[in-house]
Image: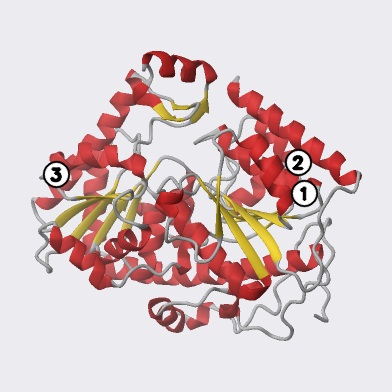
Amino acid sequence: MTDLLLQAWTASLIEAAKLDHMRGNAISWSPGEPLRLLFTGYNGARNTGSDVRVEEMLRQVRHVLGADRVRLSVLTQNFDLTRGYFGDSQQVKLADIFPPFLASEVPKHHGVVACEGSMFKSRFADALTTMMIGALGIAAARNRLSVGYGAEAGAMSKSLRRMVRRYCGTSLVITRNEESEKTLRRLAVPTEPGTDTAWTFEPHPRERGEALLRETGWDGTTPVLTICPINPFWWPVKASIGKAMIHAITGAHRDSHYRSVYFHEWGREAREAYDRYLAAIAGAVDEFRQSRTVFPVLIAMERLDGDACEHLAPRIGGAPVFVSDRHDMYDLVSILRVSRLLVSSRFHAIVTSMPGLVPSAGITMDERIANLMKERDQEDLLLTVDDPELRPKLADVLDQLWLDAEAIQAGIGRSVVRNLRSMARMGLFFEQEVRRRFPDFETRAGLVPWEDYLPPLDPTLTALCQRHAPVADASLAEAPAPASDLFAPPDTAR
């Protein structure tokens, strides 16, 4: 009921924004002034994937539009946990009760870029998708730039589907896979193909990851096996005013309390499934170590994953644990790229390890890792969190990662370059949409190499692009204009 109230509240504020715009109460962009853009996402919770995604979006937009011609702001839940992130972007504190905050903050900008990867899904939290719809919808209602960037869409509640159809029909959503495009087009949302935006992330040098591992007892030579577990069974998070009141008065629901009025789904069945998942991973790792010498490491890519890591560590010989609230994204990805093998239930652990050609397998709770492994043409490296045969299957996959490393790395390298090219095309689509909304905003002329639609690449990625050069064209000159009939083709003279 509380989620439905949030949705109704958000919808009413989008409708109010439409009326306000009709009355002429709106700021407009003028040539010569910086374009003010608000990036709305799940930042400030030390979710490494979310933070890496937004870091690279901001770098890409600055590069494509010109750093001196934009003023970028990004939402955060906690300034302390995003200190040192997001370059020179202004960080804005997101209110826990977000509808009135969006109604006040969005009109201060010329546009919104929604950043959340799981943007249109009920799997994690209806409230998060409601916030994304609210930000995009208020911007669109005021005829501002309204773009979802690197978005994924999946199963949604009926009420959310209605909101998406009603309020995102004049936004542009650049998805990160074909399945998401299909889902959104069924809801009459204009889409273009894209990918995730974490591919260009540059962590601390390898030496930093090696130093952190040495501090925990690594000898510098033993192959590192990194595991990124989660609790897959306590989602979705739902808003509940009733539970929040009881929690505040009595302390009840402590185990399931996320924050504010939001609570995880949690009970006996979920606890038992969680324990089976952790036991299967521990058993497979133990079996693998009977024939292979490795140094196991656990990484909590989000603070919430710390519980899974702490429960799993003693089951695999007291493996060291690196948690995102104690190590920033630059450290964690550096450790990932030192790894010889990676098994992860976190999508972005796999993505950010791939430029380092780390052989990786996924244990998935939803379609994100499944889509990635399908794109890599390595679906045999995909497992599911609730598979009753997870232990023996994971043991076999670990052997496969070890024995077939070279072939797996070759497939990973090709995938990275394909995704870099897709990310570059996203930059072009974004540039075109800015020009459509703001015809007087000057964009680049002539043929532009495809790499120039990406933020500057580190030497590792540059070398990968050169190695897999046949995969990519010289430029994106022939990229199509946005396909929806709602969009006019871009001018050819810039």
**Residue 269: image location, x then y, percent:** 34, 21
Dot placed on the residue nearer the N-terminal end, 3 or 2: 2
Question: What residue sits 34% from the left and 57% below the top?
Answer: 328
Proximity of marks 2 and 1: CB atoms separated by less than 8 Å: yes
Q: Which residue is mark 2?
A: 167
Q: Which residue is mark 3?
A: 316
Please rate how many residues cluster around mark 3, counting C-alpha atoms within 10 Å: few if below 14, some from 14 to 19, many from 20.
Answer: many
Q: Mark 3: which amino acid?
A: Ile
Image-based side of 208 in relation to 74, left or right: left
Res 434 label: none
- Mark 2–mark 1 Cα distance, whole angstroms, equals 8 Å
Proximity of marks 1 and 3: CB atoms separated by less than 8 Å: no
Q: Quadrant of residue 318?
A: top left
Question: What residue sits 26% from the left and 65% below the top?
Answer: 404
**Observer able to see residue 400:** yes
Q: Quadrant of residue 271?
A: top left
Q: Mark 1: which amino acid?
A: Ala
Q: Which residue is mark 1?
A: 140
Q: Is residue 361 above or below residue 214?
A: above
Viewer-closest of 111 and 467: 111
Please rate how many residues cluster around mark 1, counting C-alpha atoms within 10 Å: few if below 14, some from 14 to 19, many from 20.
Answer: many
Question: What residue sits 17% from the left and 42% below the top?
Answer: 313
Quarter of the image where the C terminus is located: bottom right
The count of marks equals 3
- Of circles 2 and 1, the one toward us is 1
- Mark 3–mark 2 Cα distance, whole angstroms, equals 49 Å
Image-based side of 65 in relation to 386, left or right: right
**Residue 210: image location, x then y, percent:** 20, 67
